[in-house]
Image: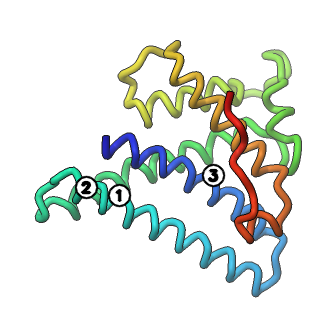
């Protein structure tokens, strides 16, 4: 349960971090510092929350730091993999870039590209589920669709609603 909750939290932290990074690119000094602070606080919250989950799961107090460090390494690997997938499979940035990547046919893919949705699904399968579920598992498909919807929603979200936290996550059928 701790692992599942930790990954669920990490996916949302990654989504917020990628949006913050996109916003930060167009900011001046003050806005950039605000974005950096936002990222630091979100990641601090994540690690504190995971630490609390470990305590609640009765992990021995002397093992908490090591368990947290293990989770940090796995979650960092997931985040790097997610960054790689979107950087390599999505051409360009801004509203509509992800939708365009999802509409590509096989013959339109550049060398080294395999398609955004299949690669994202593989990363989620390998990291979140540690390869223990079938590739055609319904919940794996749903998580892939969920992540794409959230990423697309954040991609189109203007700066002000994002920085003020005045937005809702995309609906999931």
* Vertical arrangement, residue 72 with respect to residue 139, above or below: below
Q: Nearer the viewer, residue 20 or 111?
A: 20
Can residue 87 be seen in this snapshot?
no
Q: Are marks 1 and 2 in contact (CB under 8 Å)?
A: yes
Q: Position of residue 134 (x, y in %)?
A: 44, 14
Sequence-earlier tag: 2 or 3: 3
| Numbered tag placed on residue 74 in the rendering | none
| Number of dots carrying numbers | 3
- The quadrant of the rendering that contains the C terminus is top right
* Residue annotated with mark 2: 54
Residue positioned 88% across, 41% down in the render: 96
Crowd around label 2: few <14 · some 14–19 · many ≥20 (10 Å): many
Separation (CA) of disc 2 from disc 3: 23 Å
Q: Nearer the viewer, residue 4 or 119?
A: 4
Q: Quadrant of residue 35?
A: bottom right
Separation (CA) of disc 3 from disc 1: 17 Å
| Numbered tag placed on residue 50 in the rendering | 1
Q: Position of residue 85 (x, y in %)?
A: 64, 39
Separation (CA) of disc 1 from disc 2: 6 Å
Can residue 31 be seen in this snapshot?
yes
Q: Quadrant of residue 172?
A: top right
* Residue annotated with mark 3: 15
Q: Farthest residue in the bottom direction?
A: 30
Q: Nearer the viewer, mark 2 or mark 3?
A: 2
* Vertical arrangement, residue 78 with respect to residue 63, above or below: above
Q: Position of residue 159 (x, y in %)?
A: 82, 66
- The quadrant of the rendering that contains the N terminus is top left
Crowd around label 1: few <14 · some 14–19 · many ≥20 (10 Å): many
């Amino acid at each position: 349960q701790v692992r599942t909750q930790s990954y669920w939290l990490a996916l949302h932290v990654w989504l917020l971090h990628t949006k913050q990074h996109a916003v930060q690119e167009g900011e001046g000094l003050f806005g950039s510092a605000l974005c950096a602070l936002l990222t630091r606080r979100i990641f601090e919250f994540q690690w504190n929350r995971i630490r609390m989950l470990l305590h609640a799961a009765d992990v021995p107090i002397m093992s908490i730091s090591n368990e947290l460090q293990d989770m940090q390494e796995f979650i960092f690997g997931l985040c790097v993999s997610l960054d790689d997938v979107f950087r390599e499979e999505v051409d360009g940035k801004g509203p509509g870039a992800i939708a365009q990547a999802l509409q590509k046919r096989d013959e339109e893919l550049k060398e080294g590209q395999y398609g955004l949705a299949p690669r994202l699904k593989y990363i989620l399968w390998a990291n979140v589920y540690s390869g223990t579920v079938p590739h055609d598992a319904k919940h794996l498909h749903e998580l892939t669709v969920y992540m794409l919807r959230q990423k697309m929603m954040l991609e189109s979200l203007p700066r002000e609603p994002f920085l003020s936290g005045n937005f809702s996550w995309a609906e999931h059928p």
